[in-house]
Image (cartoon, rainbow, N blue to C red):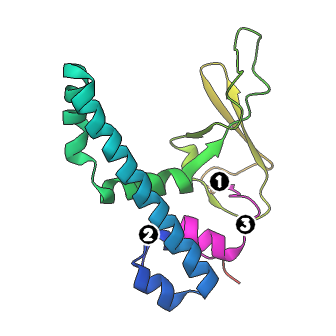
Amino acid sequence: RPEGPAWMWAEEDARRMLDAGVAQVAVDTAARVAEEHTLLLQGLSTLSTQAGDAGSDLAALILPDFSLANYRWAQGTVMSRAYAVDYSLSPSPADDASGLEGLTVLLPAIDMANHQQGVEYSVRAARGGVSFSADRSYAPGQEVMSSYGEKAPDDLLVFFGFRPPE
């Protein structure tokens, strides 16, 4: 089986190895990511021609590394590792969280927790960062787990690159 999330597999592999509906989700996701990449490239090209020197400088900085392969890698990272953060419990009124509802963020170190169905955790905004709270205690050296949510095994394969053991 190819490695990684099924949406990143070659279309032929997805259609050969997955049920038709699951393969179509993977293929559609890959097409959406490719379309986003094209639109962003068009925007960068427009920026470089219409925004003067600053736009040209920015486009020159980004465009050489903005390949479809790199964009797919970045999207795969965000899809499989982003966390929704609870901003409703900001520590003080000075920590204005308005407009942050629904924001997802990448959290280095916390995103290394692997999936285990049924694990409860919370990620909350805290002064100067975020806090991660688990529903259980862990012994030193024990793997910390999180849940990617109530997802069907096929969704885990398409977007996260694994199927849980049966």
Q: Which residues are magenta?
A: 144-163
Query: Which residue has dot 2 on it?
Result: 8
Q: Position of residue 59 (x, y in %)?
A: 24, 34
Q: Give the residue at x 31% y 60%.
A: 69
Q: Quadrant of residue 131?
A: top right
Quickly name the residue at label 3. 151
Q: Between marks 2 and 1, how big is the CA–CA gap?
A: 27 Å
Q: Determine the CA span between mark 1 and mark 3.
A: 19 Å
The three-letter code of the residue at mark 3 reads Lys
Asked if residue 150 lies in the magenta stretch, the reply is yes
Q: CA distance from mark 2 to mark 3?
A: 19 Å
Query: To which residue does mark 1 refer?
Result: 144
Residue 74, relative to residue 89: is it above or below?
A: below
**Residue situated in front as seen by the camera: 159 or 111:** 159
Residue found 32% across the figure and 44% down from its top: 42
* Mark earlier in primary sequence (2, 3): 2
Which of 26/158 is in front?
26
